[in-house]
Amino acid sequence: MICKIVTFYLQLMDQRNVTRITQIHLLGFQIPLSITFLVFFLFLVMYFVTICGNLLIITLVSYSKSLHSPMYFFLSQLSIYDILLSTDILPNMMRTVLVKKTIMSFSECLTQFYCLAMTETSECLLLTVMSWDRYLAICQPLHYSLKMNYQVCWILVILCWILGIFLLLTYSLTIANLQFCGPNIIDHFFCDFDPIMQLSCSDTTIAHLETTVLGFIVVVFPFLTIFVSYSYIIATILKIPSITGRQKVFSTCSSHLTVVSIFYGTLVCVYLAPKRGKTQTINKLLSLLYTVVTPMVNPIIYSLRNKDLKKAFRKFINNFLWINFNKY
């Protein structure tokens, strides 16, 4: 719904001739014709695995009473973000692979950028909430049920959505009010901030300033919060006398720590690492990591390292087979 509203506003901007470009040509990946269908099939499989894996997490958390806890509630919300992110990127990217060059309206391009940035922003905030949840569970277990109850969980999730929607809405409208003269070719597989800014013939100082401020709010500050949370968590784990006890406690947050490392690692490589000496092909591959690979591997990381999810999955499959067996 929000993306549709943004699209409508951007179309009004086009009618007022705020932008001179009406169409955007996405070049995508320049691959040999001989492996086109192989690459398309690979992306199709990745999209299928992403959707099925994350839907499975959401289904298990909703179905199994043993997973009705804050940690798994936040995990199901993370799966929703991953589905939205991959759906915003992969279908259009697969189309680009087949036709070699995708044409979209300028408003559609900015809408794709808004949906991508909004999802990434909300996910950064949610990962921070998840780290705080692990901090309370490990460092303050006696107060955990009081501080992280059902109502607090919903408030935190809704807050992540609201901040992601409205922070990026203001930011995207600033970009929409710039003038874009062209050329109208973007050498990427999706509409990102830097490629869009390269098409502008206006003063982009305010847009870059907002990018810096927004980056501090949704990337730097959450990362520092996660770092501090895990510093306390590790210090608490080291105080546990038995090795078995340490391993058991650490296993409850190791999956989240792995996801955070992959997510923030790729964001830093794409947006904060020096661009000198980094070709556009390398930039595309790095972008592929956090837009396509990360949403796909998140449910795999959590399912492989989590005994509760494995147990809930086996129970779900057994009940499903039992119900279908009784039908016949």
Image (cartoon, grey):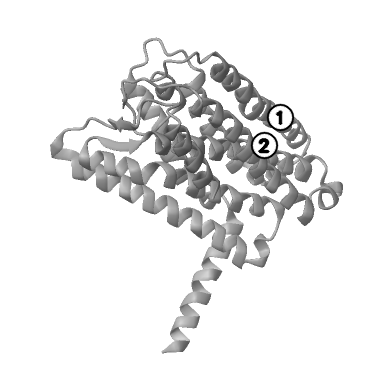
Q: Amino acid at mark 1?
A: Thr
Total tally of numbered discs in the picture: 2
How crowded pointer 1 is (Cα within 10 Å; few <14, some 14-19, many 20+) is rated as: some
User: Which quadrant is the C terminus positioned in?
Assistant: bottom left
Q: Residue furthest top?
A: 276
Residue at 58 percent of width and 52 percent of height: 306
Give the CA separation, mark 2 to mark 1. 7 Å
N-term-proximal mark, 2 vs 1: 2
Q: Position of residue 47 (x, y in %)?
A: 38, 49
Q: Amino acid at mark 2?
A: Thr
Q: Return the residue at label 2.
A: 128
Callout 2–callout 1 Cβ contact below 8 Å: yes
Above or below, 208 relative to 171: above
Q: Quadrant of residue 277?
A: top left
Q: Residue furthest front?
A: 16
Q: Position of residue 258 (x, y in %)?
A: 56, 37
Q: Secondary structure at mark 1?
A: helix
Kindly identify which numbered label has been placed on residue 30. none
Above or below, 210 relative to 157: above
Q: Quadrant of residue 315?
A: bottom right
Question: In this rendering, would 56 be left or right of 70?
Answer: left
Question: In this rendering, would 174 be left or right of 103?
Answer: right
> Can residue 282 be seen in the rendering of this structure?
yes
Kindly identify which numbered label has been placed on residue 225. 1
Residue at 17 percent of width and 39 percent of height: 35
Between 303 and 83, the one lying in front of the other is 83
Q: Secondary structure at mark 2?
A: helix
Between 17 and 61, the one lying in front of the other is 17
How crowded pointer 2 is (Cα within 10 Å; few <14, some 14-19, many 20+) is rated as: many
Between 151 and 3, the one lying in front of the other is 3
Question: In this rendering, would 88 be left or right of 132?
Answer: left
Q: Position of residue 14 (x, y in %)?
A: 42, 33
